[in-house]
Amino acid sequence: MVEKFEERGMRTQEAEALASEFSTEEEIVEYLVADNTLTDIPGVGNRTSDRIWSWFKENFTEKNQERMERSEAYCMEYQVDTPPEEATDLEKGKFYFSFICPRCDTENPMKGDPQEFANRPYCCINCRWVPLLEGGAIERFLEENGFSS
């Protein structure tokens, strides 16, 4: 496994740290799907963590989607608060929608173009949890509700 990590541009020390923690690629994928933090592993720093996360996201898109859906760190659920026929004038900010907090399921009203909120963190009005409003989920929400261009 050390060689595989070194092929990804990691230093030997970091490659050995990862190899001592994971004996197969599948173990790493499982660990990441569970939304664990790589920097908690002794000898693994931010740079190595970033490389592994990039590799994971690039090569395991479905597993990454599964991870985000299970994680409280990402908001994946939205709802329309204004009917489509009344919510089409984005220039005047008449699009009202809500993100559903992944921690407490509270509806959090928003105003404006949902795409402007994509991949940004917002605080829940109820529990104060701050999830990232995941851009792909916002795009799917817009398509499902007839708002995509």
Image (cartoon, rainbow, N blue to C red):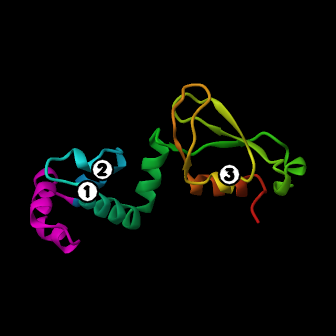
Q: Which residue is mark 3?
A: 141
Q: Earlier in the sequence, mark 2 or mark 3?
A: 2
Tell me the element at label 2.
helix
For residue 47, side relative to residue 122 (left or right): left
Tell whether position 82 is magenta: no
- Callout 3, which amino acid? Phe
Q: Are marks 1 and 2 in contact (CB under 8 Å)?
A: yes
Q: Earlier in the sequence, mark 3 or mark 1?
A: 1
- Front: mark 3 or 1: 3
How far is the residue under mark 3 from the one under mark 1? 31 Å
Q: Residue 30's mark?
A: 2
Q: Are marks 2 and 3 in contact (CB under 8 Å)?
A: no
Q: Where is residue 17 shown, x and y percent of the image?
A: 12, 55
Location of the C terminus (image quadrant)? bottom right
Res 128 quadrant in image: top right
Question: 49 or 5, which lies in front?
Answer: 49
- Front: mark 2 or 3: 3
How far is the residue under mark 2 from the one under mark 3? 28 Å
Question: 39 or 2, which lies in front?
Answer: 39
Q: Which residues are magenta?
A: 1-24
Badge 2 density bin: few <14, some 14–19, many ≥20, Cα 10 Å: few
Residue plotted at (83% across, 42% down): 82
Residue plotted at (67% across, 56% down): 115
Compared with 69, 100 (above or below) is: above
Q: Which residue is mark 1?
A: 26
- Callout 2, which amino acid? Glu
Badge 1 density bin: few <14, some 14–19, many ≥20, Cα 10 Å: few
Tell whether position 16 is magenta: yes
Q: Where is residue 45 shown, x and y percent of the image?
A: 22, 54
- Callout 1, which amino acid? Glu
Q: Where is residue 53 shown, x and y percent of the image?
A: 34, 59
The dominant secondary structure in magenta is helix
